[in-house]
Image: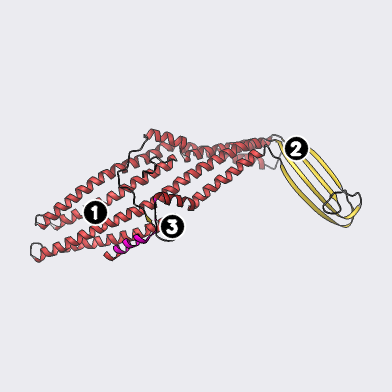
Amino acid sequence: MLHLLLVVAQLADSLPTVSLDQAIERAARLDPAYVSALGQVDNAAWARRAARLAFILPSVELSADATAYSSPYFNPGTGLEATHAYTARVTASYEVFSVSKLTALAATDATHEAAAAGELEQRFQTAMATEADYYSVLANQELLRVAAERLRRAREQLAVTRARVLHGVAVQSDSLQAALEETRAEIDSARQGVSLVVARLQLGRRVGVAGPVAAQPLDTLPAPRLPLTLEDAVSMALHEGPRYRLVRADERAASATLAGLRGTYLPTLDLTAANQEFDSRFYPGARNLSSLTLTVRLPIWTGGDREVAVSEARVNRDVARAVREDAERAARRDVTEAYETYSTARDNYVQSIRALATAAENFRVQDERYRAGASTIIELVDAQVQLTQAGSDVVQTRYAARLALAGLEAILGRRLLGNER
């Protein structure tokens, strides 16, 4: 068991090490969910750009064709019969009036805002997952030290107990109880050693390293108070939180899409300009023909496709509205849970430090009493277990507070304590 602990300690000295900021930065570039969210922002930006350019630029198309006939055919370019005809054309089309063209602006703006909010939300989710992996490494590292201390104390107790049994001042069962505690301490140390190895591998995967990665230690200061009240946090989440911004933007996009489809019941006005060249050889130049066409279109019946599309868009709008209303109703619960989880973890960390000091003093007293024959081995082992549990509680509550803070920041979409984490 001691060999395992030494191996884990030696590996830590040779492993690549990252800071928390470095881990978050690397994970953002590698997390598939965040890469996808970032790509959605680019897609939405191009859609918005295209919707705006539709008001400025016409659609332009260049084309050319060559035709071979089985027998001589009248060629409009040369005015003669020929077996070959070549045509080149340039066509520019501009949609002068269309309701869907107008609503596309609102829809693409809302879609872009939703994509930006989704990117921000995923960025914080990725950061929170990275912090969880980072804290797991540090926590397991410290828990391994707690387990090693337990094993060291258990071996000392076993040596003392055996000596007392040999001198006839303790019974054989004392030695058996001490040996049992040593075995349990060895099992706990082995389990923590494996957990640490796995946690380092997971952190390596998160930051793009094909192997274990160590984490730079963080300060052990008590977590600070939050710089805002619960009411402020709820208000900030509703106005700035990426989740709530996203569902509001989705509803606006769905409403704009529905308005655009309803606009297909109104006529559209298109202006088309074309220039064509005809000849019996390429590049055609025998005849040039230009045209300017103004087209008014009013679809009357499209086989029900338009009605189905409007119905589907209306349902999507209603669903988006329901999602937005539900998210806003849940905002207070979600923020309160995250806010109070952090506050509770913060208080628990302070209490766990006091409990550790008490448990350490209790173990010292019980150890002295047992050596003096004033207490039993059961009391000493119980004090040892309480001290180990108190040490574990300090580690767990410390990182629970940090992770709770990351969860609250993910809801609000902003850092609350800067680099103080």
Q: Which residue is mark 1?
A: 388
Specify few, some or many for label 3: CA neighbours under 10 Å numbering under 14, 14-19, or 20 or more: some
Q: Amino acid at mark 3?
A: Arg
Which amino acid is tagged 1? Answer: Thr
Foreground residue among 79 and 71: 79
Q: Is residue 169 above or below residue 409?
A: below
Q: Percent position (x, y) of residue 235?
A: 43, 33
Taking the magenta stretch, the answer to whether it contains residue 6 is yes
| Range shown magenta | 5-19
User: Percent position (x, y) of residue 331?
Assistant: 43, 37
> Does residue 1 appear in the picture of this structure?
no
Mark closest to the chain's N terminus, 3 or 1? 3
Residue pointed to by mark 3? 205
Q: Label 1: few (<14), some or many (≥20) within 10 Å?
A: many
Q: Which quadrant does the C terminus fall into?
A: top left
Q: Magenta stretch: residue 39 in it?
A: no
State the SS at label 2. strand
Q: Residue at x 51, y 50 (%)?
A: 35
> Is residue 414 or residue 374 the one in the foreground?
414
Rendering colour mode: secondary structure
Q: Amino acid at mark 2?
A: Leu
Which one is earlier in the sequence, the residue at label 1 or at label 2? 2
Q: Are marks 1 and 2 in contact (CB under 8 Å)?
A: no
In this rendering, the label closer to the viewer, 2 or 3: 3
Q: Are marks 3 and 1 in contact (CB under 8 Å)?
A: no
Mark 2 sits on what residue?
271
Could you tell me how far apart the alpha carbons at marks 2 and 3 are, in whole angstroms? 57 Å
Which badge, 2 or 3, is on the more N-terminal residue? 3
Q: Residue sitting at 79 percent across and 52 percent down?
A: 65
Residue situated in front as seen by the camera: 394 or 210: 210
